[in-house]
Image (tube, helix red, strand yellow):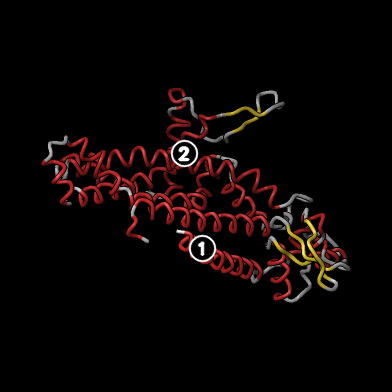
Amino acid sequence: MIKYILHKTGYALLTIFGVVSVIFLLFNILPGDPAQMMLGQNQSEEQINMVKKKYGFDQPLTTQYLYYLNDLSPLSFHAKNEKNYTFLKEEKYNALPLFSIGNNQVVIKSPYLRESFQRKGKTVSAIIKETLPNTIILAVSAIIIALLIGLFLGIISALNQDNFIDKSIQIISTLGMSIPSFFSAIIFAWLFGYVLHNYTNLEMTGSLFALDDYGEKYSLRLKNLILPALVMGIRPVAVVTQLMRNSLLEVLQQDYIRTAKAKGLSNFQVIYKHALKNSLNPVITAVSGWFASMLAGAVFVEYIFGWNGLGKEIVEALNTLDLPVIMGAVLIIAIMFILINIFVDIIYTKLDPKVK
């Protein structure tokens, strides 16, 4: 197991390195001047040149890339006499000096994602720290809804194979997979937040925390979680239903299931004690993929519902060309996607030792 985990960890580090490289190159070959984006259109050439020198925008792309890797790496090098690149200073990193190599000092720190172009003095890490928990809460809520409804419908569908109930559930799940999340979000917000507002008491927009009527303090608004979580859970419900149905039908044909039935066990006991566990492997794999995808797919849903999460932050950063926020958010989502898949692979080996 340890060897397996180390293998997966090495694979993850290589993948993260590739993701970092692609993100940097993608956003640095785009047209536009980062210094101009930071200062606006009415700044002098002298001010623009100062910003370029301060943040290293006047350096070759390869040099900027090495500085970017240095910022992200937990172990990084800092030139003792460095004056031009303020983002290399230890106070920016909250770094702990380890040892010196010539004129360079090796420090240990948390990854530094630079500063926002549009929010002066605010780091990308601080922005992500404020918004990512809301996105995770939304994604977890959607997955829980998908599992509860999808597993139930999948089991019912498998037990009623090829009859009216089975075919109805399959039609509904197919529709659920074919409808884009942003379209569902618009329909749900309009129908349940506007047309049926007097009955549902739900709002078209709103986040997990909202200011009170006096604008003095934030209060928890759990009802604002209902609509976006339902919308994000629609497509996973359809996938879980189909996977659970097909997997359970396959397991029910196994010899040990026939043996269990021959011993006089009821259908409930056969499914609960024998068939269900062995049917969950493809479901767990799918759920892990959907959970990671939700972190990226929440962009439009959060924006439509006004949910103060990382997805909404990405849309606003795209509108203002705030490249450090976009790069940091995409990088965090990619890393979480990789880590979730590794975690699921490890769980998978526990459920099915043959995977080893």
Give the x, y percent position of residue 72. 68, 61
Q: Secondary structure at mark 2?
A: helix
Residue shown at 86% from the left, 65% from the top: 50
Give the x, y percent position of residue 323. 67, 59
Residue type, numbered disc 1: Leu
Classify 210 as above or below 77: above
Give the x, y percent position of residue 249. 20, 49
Q: Which residue is mark 1?
A: 6
Q: Quadrant of residue 29?
A: bottom right
Classify 171 as above or below 338: above
Q: Earlier in the sequence, mark 2 or mark 1?
A: 1
- Callout in the foreground (2, 1): 1
Residue type, numbered disc 2: Ser
Q: Secondary structure at mark 1?
A: helix
The residue sitting at the left extreme is: 262
The C terminus appears in which quarter of the rendering? Answer: bottom left
The N terminus appears in which quarter of the rendering? Answer: bottom left
Q: Nearer the viewer, residue 5 or 305?
A: 5
The residue sitting at the front extreme is: 2
Give the x, y percent position of residue 66. 71, 71
Would residue 78 appear left or right of 176 to someone viewing this image?
right
Residue shown at 79% from the left, 50% from the top: 121
Would residue 126 appear left or right of 305 to someone viewing this image?
right
On residue 141, which mark appears?
Answer: 2
As measured in the structure, the alpha-carbon distance from the residue carrying label 2 to the one carrying label 1 is: 31 Å
| Label 2 close to label 1 by CB (< 8 Å) | no
Q: Nearer the viewer, residue 26 or 341?
A: 341
